[in-house]
Image (cartoon, helix red, strand yellow):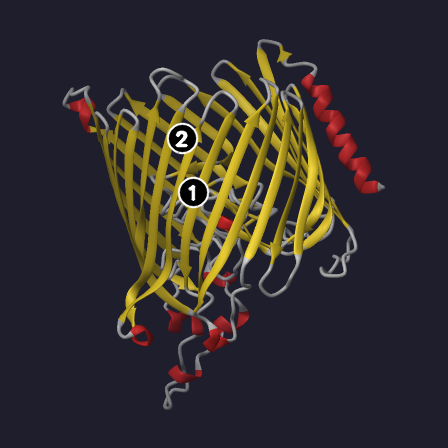
Amino acid sequence: MKRLTLLLVGVALTLSVSAQKVVGNGQVSGSLESSSIYYAPDKKIERPDDHFGSNNYIKVDYSNGRFSAGVQMNAFLPALVGYEELADGYKFYLASKYIQWRDKNFEILVGDIFDQYGNGLIFRSFEDRQLGLNNSLEGVRAGYNFGRYVTLKGMYGRPRLYTEYSKTWVRGADLVVSIADIIKVPVINFTLEGSYVNRYQSLSQAPEYMHEEDPSTIDPITGVGKTFIESYGISPNLNMYSGRLNFGWNGLSVRGEYVHKSKDFDVNESVTHKGWAALGEVGYNYKTFSVMGTFRALSHMGTAIDMYTTGTGNILNYLPALTRQYTYMLANLNPYQVITKGELGGQVDLCYSYRSKSNRYRYWNFHANFSTFYSLKKQPWTNNERQLFWRDINIDVERQWNKKWKSLILYSFQDNMDHQAHIFVGDVTHKFNRKMSLRFELQYLLSGDDKSEWDGMHSEGDWVAALVEFNLAPHWSFYVQDMYNIGQSKTHYYNGGFSYTYNRTRVQLSYGRNRAGYICSGGVCRFSPAYTGVNLVLTSSF
């Protein structure tokens, strides 16, 4: 009852604020997001000890000319299953706050900073509620634009680690020079960029055993040896550098980045490593055709906020999987996870659209994607060749037949370290009128070669899935879906529910059984345990 009361109070406060959008000469905006689950009994899935969980986020911003400020409050009552790192029991706290002044060329922000340098390989502070991640930097950021030619910004602060701030300190600077504007060639876009990031963490924060002597280094005469900290070569300072270029002309775009990282301590292996990464991207589009190729190689680029601990949210940089991001259930059953110790690979993406000149409701969309990643080094157990981590070859064809009918067919062949899978998807939508539509999905996963029998790991065999969705725009949407393992477990993972949208408020209620697996957002994934329950999601903005 206490949890429900707190949740309703938060909703009431947000809705009451939304009634007054203008305050003096400024304007107030905000949002509420709430996800609550009642975990139901299930003979096939273990029920959590706490039968209720609720993650809630309330954000309010104020802007007046060049001045802006904002706060965000988070409440876990308690945290949902899979998000226990965020809170142990009940937690209500100030998640972020800021004040900012910005004019034509200058800006300064004091508070919690969300920012990214380049492609995020050395630094990215962001919030992703689906992943339960918020690594904002509490401190100060300032930037200045020297016309259109040079942009310089710097920051200093301590990063958030889950619901508290870490004891590390981060400082950095980012520089962008527009060569095209300097040489006055407006038809191209050409910039040179560079970044520097330093993470400082006192050696006194190391675990107690690291302050003791390493027996292997004790001098037999003096009886004095190095501490484990000295043996590991741990430094309180981590330095990272990035150099980048961006070029664009007509439909051609070229991007590149190289990163160097000084020695960093890996708590999982109790060793220190230098790191590096190289990223290249080439794209071209002409009318309804586009192609994009991305390549990346990296070595020991997983950078923790606190180098002495582990955890999904303990990240200072951004290393997304450069693979296709699916929305279909079976295609996203076993997503690729970046191997931060070392990987080499990339992806190619091609799109082409053919439009009927006589009927705007008839068109074809063709899409093909290929991604593959290997170990950075050759491995003795693979005949001195690079080990295959991942390969996905997929193609989909979307056809708008007329004003009422649309279909999509997708095929994906996925090959990872454990097993192979062939995935087939059929997606059909029928519009009865402007407001009413019905959509069907049929999916099948045919399990291929199982490559992990040697270590006791096996694929789950074949899967089948289906979804039916009925929409009554602009307010109502209903759906039922089921994912069934016909290989080993013979288990149904069913789900059904509805949503109602009014203006900027959306309420969704659903019930079902959810399989244990990875939830991914933007190429970053978090493991979610299995559960069965009733899920209530509320989002509102003003």
x, y (%) of residue 66?
47, 16
CA gap between label 2 and label 1 equals 16 Å
Q: Residue furthest right?
A: 1
| Labelled disc at residue 124 | 1
Which residue is the site of mark 2? 142
Q: Looking at the rendering, which quadrant does residue 396 occupy?
A: top left
x, y (%) of residue 339?
40, 59
| Figure disc tally | 2
Please state which amino acid type lies under the numbered disc 2.
Answer: Ala
Position of 22 relative to 84 (above/below): above
Badge 2 marks a residue whose secondary structure is strand
Position of 444 relative to 172 (above/below): below
Q: Residues within 10 Å of mark 2 (few under 14, many from 20)?
A: some
Residue drawn at x 40%, y 77% as measured from the top left: 226
Q: Nearer the viewer, residue 254 or 365?
A: 365
x, y (%) of residue 194?
27, 40
Please state which amino acid type lies under the numbered disc 1.
Answer: Arg
Q: Looking at the rendering, which quadrant does residue 467 occupy?
A: top right
Q: Which badge, 2 or 1, comes first in the chain's sequence?
A: 1
Q: Nearer the viewer, residue 95 or 509?
A: 509
Q: Looking at the rendering, which quadrant does residue 58 occupy?
A: top right
Q: Residue furthest bottom?
A: 221
